[in-house]
Amino acid sequence: MNGLPFVDADEVRRRIDPDRARTLIEGALKAGFDPADDPARSHADAGSGHLLLMPSTLGDWVGVKVASVAPDNPALGLPRIQAVYVLMDAKTLTPRVFVDGVSLTSLRTPATSAVAADHLADPDASHLVVFGNGPQAVEHVAAMAGIRALSSVRMVGRTPHKVAAALAELAERGITAEAGTVADVADADIVVCATSSAEPLFDGSLVRDGACVIAMGSHEVDRRELDAALMSRAQVVVEERGSALRECGDVVLAIEEGPLTVDDLIGLAPLVRGEVTRRTDRPNVFKGSGMSWQDLAVAVGVAPTD
């Protein structure tokens, strides 16, 4: 334990780019990992907020992310969410490295979305619409640009100066994007929802058959970005049914309102393994809430080699 190395955010980014993160997550599923075997995310009240504990095991590695959520932190000039990841070898459970947990989250969430979108979007998809203007929205644009040749990227947000800042950040990364509106959904091949909204962001009837919609903005059963009308006519893919029913308001509320049922939900693993394919006669939706195995799959990319 003496001198246990810490991989900071900059080093994580140097070692793992978005494409590598996507490959690591898809590789775990192709190797046979079943997301249903992942322990449920646990919550614990702590201090001025709460902790999220996310353990997982993948092959030779075990890991746990400890994330703190302190709602009052922004007023103090501190991040609302902070996290550290502990990576251990599975044989002895000896800690091998600490990793910046926020950078892992910023990589694994869009990478998981990109895995789903790569299987659910038209191979020629070129028009992307993203709701949101925060870090996850920006990272999702980069992730989608890694799987499709995008000719149009529109970002939809409620605060113009924040949208402008996101567009400037994308421009620095060589991605051209512009401000959009809800109406752009009608022409979109891929729609990404990366917001904290508790209510649907748009009328689901705007989404074309064959289009791909990614929703990843929350892991709470009383919040949703997509309406029941879209969920009921779409092919709906989730990380796995159990986690979706525990944490995904887009799914839970649509089932309560009908006619979406639990049996309609398709797991990400069968999609990746080719047991299910995209539909052209209806929209294709992926709802993700983030799971522990995804953090571990990416953390393995910074694992010691000795």
Image: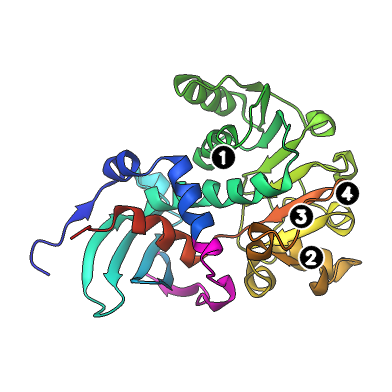
Mark 1 neighbour class, 10 Å CA radius: few under 14, some 14 to 19, many 20 or more:
many
On whether residue 225 falls in the magenta region, the answer is: no
User: In the image, is 176 to the left or to the right of 193?
Assistant: left
Residue position for label 3:
277
- Give the CA distance from mark 4 to mark 1: 23 Å
Residue at x-position 27% and y-position 43%: 11
271 over 166 or under it: above or below: below
Q: Secondary structure at mark 1?
A: helix
On whether residue 46 falls in the magenta region, the answer is: yes
- The image quadrant that residue 155 belongs to is top right
Q: Give percent across and percent down for residue 290.
A: 55, 60
Q: Give percent across and percent down for residue 140.
A: 57, 39
- Give the CA distance from mark 3 to mark 2: 25 Å
Q: Secondary structure at mark 4?
A: loop
Mark 4 neighbour class, 10 Å CA radius: few under 14, some 14 to 19, many 20 or more:
some
Residue at x-position 31% and y-position 45%: 9
Q: Secondary structure at mark 3?
A: loop
- Give the CA distance from mark 4 to mark 3: 12 Å
Residue 72 visible from this viewpoint: yes
* Magenta segment boundaries in residue numbering: 28-48
Residue position for label 2:
253
Depth order, front residue of 266/230: 266
181 over 259 or under it: above or below: above
- Give the CA distance from mark 2 to mark 1: 25 Å
Mark 4 or mark 2: whose residue is earlier in sequence: 2
Q: Give percent across and percent down for residue 286.
A: 70, 54
In front: mark 2 or mark 1?
Answer: 1
User: In the image, is 300 to the left or to the right of 197?
Assistant: left
Residue position for label 4:
282
Residue type of the residue flagged with mark 1: His
Mark 1 or mark 3: whose residue is earlier in sequence: 1
